[in-house]
Image: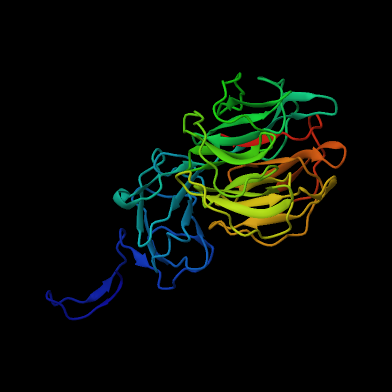
Amino acid sequence: MSGQVGNNILRTSGVVAATAAGLNWVSTVVTASTLTAEAGNGYFINTTSNTCTITLPSSAEAGDQIVFMDYLRTWGTNKIIIDSNGLNYQGEDDTYTVEYDTDGETVNIVYSGATKGWIPLNDDVVADVPVSANDEGIFGFGYTVSSVTAITNLVSNAGVVATDVTGVGTARYLVGATEYGGDKGIFGFGYTTGDVSMTNLVSNAGVVATDTTGVGTARDSLAASGYGTDKGIFGFGTTGSVTAVTNLVSNSGVVATDVTGVGTARQGIAACEYGSDKAIFGYGNTGSVTAITNLVSNSGVVATDTTGVGTARKIIAACGYGYDKGIFGYGTVTYPTGVSMTNLVSNSGVVATDTTGVGTARFFLEATQYGGDKGIFGYGTTGSKVSISNLVSNSGVVATDTTGVGTVRDALGACSFN
């Protein structure tokens, strides 16, 4: 408190200085998608129209306090994301994603020092603990100019694709891949001389393990995505006939038996995360190209068909970006002519209309997130196999071609790890 003191019980007057530990509530309600917060302030955050990313101070002293309040009880629809700006948050560094998504929530944080950093005073109502935002990615398996392969290529946290790593596991193509466990990945299923259901785990250092005996229906041309912050799901594909079966992946990388398919059976589809803990399958070939999608809840339940938005096509790719959104890209409408259009996915799972493509039109490519909040499309075929890549910014903008690194190939898989 500060200001002039008038009559009071002590009959004294004078100027009262601001209290060091006091809190100043900012009267202007925050409605923007970003906020740079200052220590000692309280903020009313209105997320009716959008998620709000809040950047904390880059330096702080023990005892500094900031409060954020859900002004209209809308954080359950559009959450807040806290960027700790180089300082720790509950003992984790700022490569971790901190999100709050409970309607009516108030987040009251105090800085404790360098070791633990910012600590919430209201853990009893915190909906989400920090979740690792995977920094790196991996492309793997596929079909080269002449044969199936198991080679992999790592993607750095700056989106740089590395040279080939000798393949581990059975060479195959038309595989799926997803992250699991918060920081690891898994390649699964595919085609060798026939459909298989084997999997290969990827460590949080990007090392691919030998084959794990397959569980579930052997198939190819499927898709996979993470869900629920630390689990994964393989879904759809073909066994010779299109299918909609799914297989959940636990947070320890164990693949479950088949779950009866929901939605239109199809192959050549793609899948990605959205909303930080949910997933979406989209597009593909039912016998003809389609743009239908199927949402996946944060408990791994696949929903019935959502009417397609955007150009119907198949053999596309998808990945997450911006922490809580996704993007479908490329593919073919009429084989073998590729396209380079994309479709953004909002943090509520709504697919947008076509965005004019950037980069070489192609299909049978793959995509993964990297750097926590960005994505990359890579490899594929234009009629000739390529290794070019296209980076996706954290606002969903696709960049022009990056010269390819690694063996040219198509029909591969990709996922992130940390």
| Residue found at the very far front of the displayed protein | 241
Residue 210 coordinates in the image, percent (x, y) = 61, 18
Residue 180 coordinates in the image, percent (x, y) = 52, 35
**Is 2 on the left-hand or right-hand side of 298?**
left
Residue 46 coordinates in the image, percent (x, y) = 45, 67
Query: In this orientation, does residue 223 appear?
Result: no
Closer to us: 96 or 396:
396
Q: Quadrant of the N terminus?
A: bottom left
Query: In this orientation, does residue 28 appear?
Result: yes
Q: Is residue 36 above or below residue 179?
A: below
Q: Is residue 83 above or below residue 141?
A: below
Where, by quadrant of the figure, is residue 200 drawn?
Answer: top right
Q: What colouring does the structure picture have? A: rainbow
Where, by quadrant of the figure, is residue 405 drawn?
Answer: top right
| Residue found at the very far left of the displayed protein | 9
**Is 193 on the left-hand or right-hand side of 231?**
right
Closer to us: 191 or 88:
191
The residue lying at 46 percent from left, 61 percent from top is: 77
Closer to us: 42 or 33:
33
Residue 65 coordinates in the image, percent (x, y) = 36, 55
Q: Quadrant of the C terminus?
A: top right
| Residue found at the very far bottom of the displayed protein | 7
Q: How many badges with numbers are in the image? A: 0
Where, by quadrant of the figure, is residue 343 drawn?
Answer: bottom right
**Is 351 on the left-hand or right-hand side of 64?**
right
Closer to us: 404 or 329:
329
The residue lying at 42 percent from left, 64 percent from top is: 74
